[in-house]
Amino acid sequence: MKSKKKKFSSLSILSIARVNPYKNKKNEKYMNKNQINHFKKILESWRNHIEKKINYEKNNILKEQINFPDPIDRAVQEEEFNLKLQNNARNIKIIKKINNTLKKIELNDFGYCASCDIKIGIKRLEARPTANLCIDCKTLSEIREKQIIK
C-alpha cells in the first residue's frame, strides 16, 4: 500500500522550524529583532529540510536504478524518475527563493511589499515566508496574469 503524501501547508513550515505562530506584543515595532529571528529560523529550517529531501531523492534514484528487460517496466521506472527530478527542480527553485529572502533580511528589506512598500504582515509571511508582495498587490498581479493568458 502506498503512503499518502502530506499536503504542504504553512503550519508544516512552522512545525519544520519547530516554532509557534508569532504573537505580537503590544506597541511592538514591525520587523523588530524578535520577528526577524523568527523568520530567519523558519527560512533556514525550511531550506535545510528541502536540501535533505533533495539529497534523499538523489540517493534513492541511484539506488533504484534497475535495468528492466521489459520495456513497459523500464518506461514506468523512467517516468517515476522524471517525476522525482521535476520535484527536485521545483524544490531547487524554492531554495533559491529562500536564499533571496534571507538576503532581503540581511539588507533590512524583508517584510515590505516590493511593489507598494507597505507591510506584508506577519500572518501572510508565516503562510508564505518568501512572499514579496502584499496581498492586494499579489491579487492584482494574478488578475493581470489571467488577463494576459486569456
Image: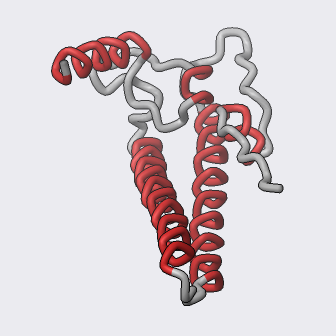
Q: Quadrant of the C terminus?
A: top left
Structure colour scheme: secondary structure
Where residue 88 appears, as percent x and y from the top left, is: 50, 61
Q: Is residue 122 above or below residue 52?
A: above
How many circles with numbers are drawn on the protein?
0
- Horizontal placement of 128 versus 96: left or right? right
Say which of 59 and 93 sits in front: 59
Q: Residue at x 38, y 15 (%)?
A: 118
Say which of 27 and 102 sits in front: 102
Say which of 112 and 69 sits in front: 69
In which image quadrant can residue 19 be found? top right
Where residue 80 appears, as percent x and y from the top left, is: 54, 65
Q: Residue at x 61, y 39 (%)?
A: 39
Where residue 34 appears, as percent x and y from the top left, is: 67, 34
- Horizontal placement of 142 versus 123: left or right? left
Where residue 55 appears, as percent x and y from the top left, is: 60, 73
- Horizontal placement of 20 versus 123: left or right? right
Q: Is residue 8 above or below residue 84?
A: above
| Residue 17 visible from this viewpoint | no
Say which of 70 and 103 sits in front: 70
Q: Residue at x 39, y 44 (%)?
A: 107
In which image quadrant can residue 132 be found? top left
Q: Quadrant of the N terminus?
A: bottom right
In which image quadrant can residue 48 be found? bottom right
| Residue 15 visible from this viewpoint | yes
Q: Residue at x 58, y 77 (%)?
A: 61
